[in-house]
Amino acid sequence: MMEPIDPEAGAILLVDKPITWTSFNVVSKVRMTLRKLCGHRVKVGHAGTLDPLASGLLIIGTGKCTKELQQLTDEDKAYTATLRLGQTTPSYDAETDVDQERPWDHVNEDAIRQVLNDFTGPIQQFPPDFSAKRFKGERAYFLARKGETVDLPAVPVTIHALDLVSWQGTDVTVDVRCSKGTYIRSLAHDIGQKLGCGAHLVGLRRTASGSFHVKDARTPEEWSEWFDRWVSERKANGDS
C-alpha cells in the first residue's frame, strides 16, 4: 500500500490485528501515535470489533474518514475459523475452560459437509452469553462471568458461504463469508451441536471486510514504522 495517505486529515488504515490485542488497543495505539506526532488530538475509530482471541483485518478510520466507519461496519465479512470437535466451552471459544467432552469419532467428512451446507443461507443465530450484547441493561459477558442466567434472543444473519478447508483429528477449519453481526463462535457451537459431538472455536482470522482484504493490511509494528517515515517526510517537506 504505497498510495499517499494523511492520517491527520483523514485516512482508512488496514491493520492486521494480532491475537490478544483488543480492537480498542489498536485504536488507542493509533490515537496516541497521532497525538504525539501531530501535537493535537485526532479522531480515531474502527469498523467491526475483533475479539482478543481473533487475528486479522481491523479497519481503522482517522479524522474525517471516521464518518465512513458505520458504512464499513455494515459490510459483509470473511473469516477462516478452526473448530475443535468433541469439546464445548461456556464462551463457545477458548476464553473459558472446557465444560463438556463428547465422542466425536462417529463424525465423517460427508457429515461435516452436509452440516456446513445446512448452515448456509439466512439463519436465526443466538449470540453467545459471553458477548458484548446487552441483556437487562448489562453487558451479557459481565452477567455470564458472574454465573447469572443470560437469555439473549436470536437474531437473523446470513452465511453466504461456508466451505471446508481442512480436517485434522478433532480440528475442522472452514472459510466463512457472512453478514455483519454474525458470531463465528456461535456458528462453531451450533455446528458441533448439529454433528452431535459439540464443538468450540479455537482459531479465528478475519480475512476480508467488504472490499478490503487482510493481505493489504499492516501489522501494528509495520504501522509504527510507517508513521516514523510519514513524520520524517512531513518534516523534510517543511510541514509542522
Image: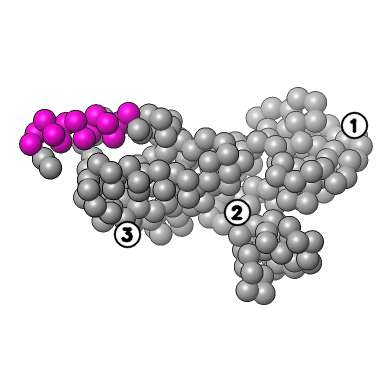
Q: Earlier in the sequence, mark 1 or mark 2?
A: 1
Residue 54 falls within the magenta-colored stretch: no
* For the residues bearing labels 1 and 3, Cβ distance under 8 angstroms: no
Q: Amino acid at mark 1?
A: Asp
**Is label 3 in a helix, a strand or a loop?**
helix
Q: Amino acid at mark 3?
A: Lys
Residue linked to disc 3: 67
Separation (CA) of disc 3 from disc 2: 23 Å
Separation (CA) of disc 1 from disc 2: 29 Å
Residue 26: x, y in percent? Answer: 44, 44
In front: 202, or 181? 202
Q: Quadrant of the C terminus?
A: top left
**Would residue 183 be visible to someone looking at this image?**
yes
Q: Earlier in the sequence, mark 3 or mark 2?
A: 3
Residue linked to disc 1: 105
- Quadrant in the picture for residue 127: bottom right
In front: 21, or 72? 21
Check the image and tell me how it is coloured.
Answer: one colour
Q: Which residues are magenta?
A: 225-238
Residue found at x 11% / y 40%: 239
